[in-house]
Amino acid sequence: MSNATVSRLGLVDNTGTDFDALFLKVFSGEVLSAFTRNNIFNEQLHSVRTITSGKSAQFPVLGTATASFHTPGNLLTGGNQIRHGERVISIDDLLIADVFVSRLEELKNHYDIRAQYADELGKALAKTYDENVAKMIAQASRASSTLTGIAGGLTLTLASGNTASSDVTGDEIAAAIYDIAQAFDERDIPPTDRFCVLPPAEYYKLAESATRTVNVDFNPGGGNGSFASGNVQQVAGIPIMKSNNVPQSNRSAASGENNAYNGDDSKTIGLVFHKSAVGTVKLMDMTTEITGNDYATMYQGTLMVAKYALGHGILRPECAATIKLSAS
């Protein structure tokens, strides 16, 4: 009996040898995203407040009181005059990420694109959120105090010769974090809810080249990370994180921004801060919308929108610090 003649379903024009050319590639219900950034500047790292109306929110700032010994018989007259001030965070214009999907092209497509598009729109807003919070922490490190007698932000510039990221060693980064931790202690900033966020290059230097950060001789039990995993838990009791959203450029003001996110951070290589350094005010949390039948009839497609209305601002400059490269 002779062999059967196979009709090759995947062969183009029944010619050639690529028998799989016409078969659809296997999609596991998702499309690979170009690259998902690691967003970490959420409500765990800074203060977040929600309002139901208005264009801004006021945050009261109070000074400190003093104590003195009382002399018997002397009249108490209220010796403290505690200073008062406020910080105002405005709501930026509505931030939108949107995409239009043609109905005809959606029908021709062989995988569900709507869920993927919605996810990408949300990531676009999350990235802007992260960048603006990080930028505001950098701004706080350069800001003066709201009240007299309270320190302003802190900028720690590395020693001369560290003009580029490639010049900086892990030990120098660790030493800078220790110096900032000491400054925070001297300012009576609580030791809890402190954080350090570094770009990947500086983060991995702590794991790769710093003498003591992951060395078991200085970290009994080896619980502070490892060279093998490229992981560092903390330095000077401050949790260490990495993010591509640490500001490292000279950013100009953009239309729609009602808070000052602009400034020169081209020399910044790290942020160290307390949770109370900056705040976010939410008027409208992130939501997504998809147009209905009327729009689909008129435009023969679907408009997908992701949006939020919020703003970020400085609360306590004394709780923010940046690590910067030297000028020469």
Image (spheres, rainbow, N blue to C red):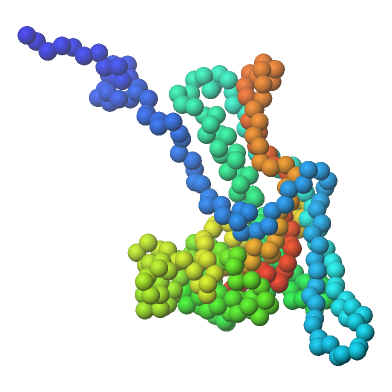
Q: Is residue 9 visible?
A: yes
| Residue occupying the far top of the picture | 1
Q: Is residue 172 above or below residue 241?
A: below
In the image, residue 136 sits, relative to residue 21, either above or below, namely below
Lateral position of residue 110 relative to residue 309, left or right: left
In this orientation, which residue lies closer to the viewer: 211 or 273?
273
Residue 30 position, x and y percent, is 45, 34
Residue shown at 61% from the left, 53% from the top: 42
Asked if 36 appears above or below 216 in the picture, the reply is above
Residue found farthest to the left:
1
Image location (x, y in percent) of residue 57: 80, 53
Along the horizontal axis of the image, is 109 left or right of 247? left
x then y, percent, for residue 92:
76, 48
Q: Quadrant of the N terminus?
A: top left
Q: Quadrant for residue 89, please give it.
A: bottom right
Identity of the residue drawn at 43% across and 69% down:
224
Residue at 67% from the left image edge and 76% from the top image edge? 188
Can the viewer see residue 255 in this picture? no
